[in-house]
Image (spheres, grey):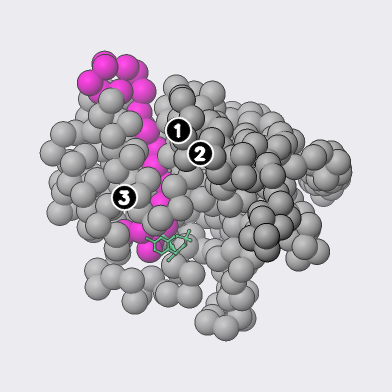
């Protein structure tokens, strides 16, 4: 399914009917996420943060989907969806603090960068083992259904995750128990270096949903308005007791898998270039320019605002101290068990004290 045509006009039959202001807000959020990604990748290359996993090229799939969910709906991310969290109003400073693992990082540096969460924004903690978040999402949806809450869940995962046991268990459960969940599969062509053709014997990912009797569609994941329309439909089905929906968002990971990856080793420059022409940000920009509500000047101004904002957050994050060593041992148990008390005391003594003891 597509909504935005090549010339920037809309397919009126599928147009989700967003206002100009709403479309511009979507566009701005996509640009902001890309600028944040770009800055974080640079500072990782300079050794100032350890790691970053970005969403270059997948902004429409992520932000278009988040925009279609309601505030009360949960977002269960994979690890590439911080754009969805920022869309919900999460402070950029807090995210950058997390990337530095400093004293203001909500995760206190205990997790890898880009593994954050926010209960108040209804954004579940990132679960790094591939596919494990999918049954978590179905569980969350079932809890809402059991308690008769007007909430549903949107869960993100990649094409690679559809090969995990967890994906199949979650799809089966959602099909049988009619869980209010929207499965959002970002088919970005690769699971690190493994192309999707070698991931599965099926022609599409969407057809897997038929085995669980979950209604499915394939959507142009680089078309923010098509993503919005499809996810809104899935959310409405879930909210009205119609059960789960599966959406295959066809997109492309323009960058590396993460800052630990060099994609030039396993894919051609021509392939990346071809997808670069289908960039979701260019696509949505063409639409707002076609409507006469956007131009080069406005674009440059917005990019400058975002750039200054992220640089400012980085500057502040670098001035903050690391978390206290004692914090490594807090937060997990209501009452700290003896072995953590003991380990905590040893850590505070420091490695030098331990080494001196060994020598004696
Ligand atoms: C169970 C498990 N196996 C392997 C990994 C290492 N790993 C991290 S990301 C990744 C690829 C996932 O690809 P996909 O689901 O398509 O998501 P994408 O990164 O493309 O968004 C792998 C294999 C992991 N995190 N968990």
What residue do we see at 41% from left, 55% from top?
Answer: 129
**Marks 3 and 2 close (CB-CB < 8 Å):** no
Q: Can you say whether 140 is above or below 100 in the image?
A: above
Q: Position of residue 246 (x, y in %)?
A: 30, 46
> From the viewer's perspective, is the residue at label 3 or at label 1 nearer?
1
Residue 13 picture location, percent across and down: 41, 40
* Residue shown at 59% from the left, 71% from the top: 261
Percent x, y of residue 73: 42, 27
Q: Which residue is mark 2?
A: 340
**Number of on-image labels:** 3
Q: Is residue 280 visible?
A: no
Q: Quadrant of ligand 1?
A: bottom left
Q: Secondary structure at mark 3?
A: strand
Sequence-wise, which precedes: disc 3 or disc 2?
3
Q: In terms of depth relative to the viewer, which is nearer, 19 or 356? A: 356
Mark 3 Cα shell of 10 Å, populated few (<14), some (14-19), many (≥20): some
In the displayed structure, does residue 346 sit left or right of residue 100? left
Q: Residues within 10 Å of mark 1 (few under 14, many from 20)?
A: few
Start and end of the magenta stretch? 144-162
Residue where numbered disc 1 is placed: 337
Whether tag 1 and tag 2 are in contact, CB under 8 A, the answer is yes
The residue drawn where x is 46% and y is 53% is 128
Q: Residues within 10 Å of mark 2 (few under 14, many from 20)?
A: some
* Left or right for 177, reference 105: left
Residue 111: x %, y % from top left: 56, 47
Residue located beneath label 3 in the image: 217
- The answer to which of marks 3 and 1 sits earlier in the sequence is 3
Q: Are marks 3 and 1 in contact (CB under 8 Å)?
A: no
Quarter occupied by residue 360: bottom right
């Amino acid at each position: 399914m597509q909504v935005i045509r090549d010339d920037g006009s809309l397919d009126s039959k599928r147009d989700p009917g967003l206002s100009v202001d709403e479309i511009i807000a979507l566009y701005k959020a996509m640009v902001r996420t890309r600028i944040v990604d770009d800055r974080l990748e640079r500072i990782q290359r300079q050794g100032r943060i350890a790691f970053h996993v970005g969403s270059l090229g997948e902004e429409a799939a992520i932000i278009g989907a988040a925009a279609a969910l309601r505030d009360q709906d949960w977002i269960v991310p994979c690890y590439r969806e911080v754009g969805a969290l920022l869309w919900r109003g999460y402070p950029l400073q807090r995210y950058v603090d997390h990337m530095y693992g400093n004293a203001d990082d909500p995760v206190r540096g205990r997790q890898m960068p880009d593994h954050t969460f926010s209960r108040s924004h209804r954004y579940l903690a990132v679960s790094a083992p591939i596919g494990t978040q999918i049954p978590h999402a179905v569980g969350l949806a079932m809890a809402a259904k059991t308690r008769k809450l007007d909430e549903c869940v949107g869960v993100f995962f990649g094409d690679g995750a559809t090969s995990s046991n967890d994906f199949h268990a979650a799809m089966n459960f959602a099909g049988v128990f009619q869980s209010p969940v929207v499965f959002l599969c970002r088919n970005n062509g690769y699971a690190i270096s493994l192309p999707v053709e070698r991931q599965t014997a099926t022609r599409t990912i969407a057809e897997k949903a038929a085995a669980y009797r979950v209604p499915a569609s394939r959507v142009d994941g680089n078309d923010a308005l098509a993503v919005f329309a499809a996810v809104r439909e899935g959310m409405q089905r879930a909210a009205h007791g119609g059960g789960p929906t599966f959406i295959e968002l066809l997109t492309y990971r323009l960058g590396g898998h993460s800052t630990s990856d060099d994609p030039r080793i396993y894919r051609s420059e021509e392939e990346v270039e071809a997808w670069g022409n289908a960039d979701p940000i260019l696509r949505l920009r063409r639409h707002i320019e076609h409507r006469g509500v956007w131009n080069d000047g406005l674009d440059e101004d917005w990019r400058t605002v975002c750039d200054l904002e992220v640089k400012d957050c980085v500057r502040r994050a670098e001035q903050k101290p690391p978390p206290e060593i004692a914090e490594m041992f807090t937060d997990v148990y209501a009452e700290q068990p003896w072995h953590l008390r003991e380990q905590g005391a040893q850590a505070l003594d420091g490695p030098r004290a331990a080494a001196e003891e060994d020598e004696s």
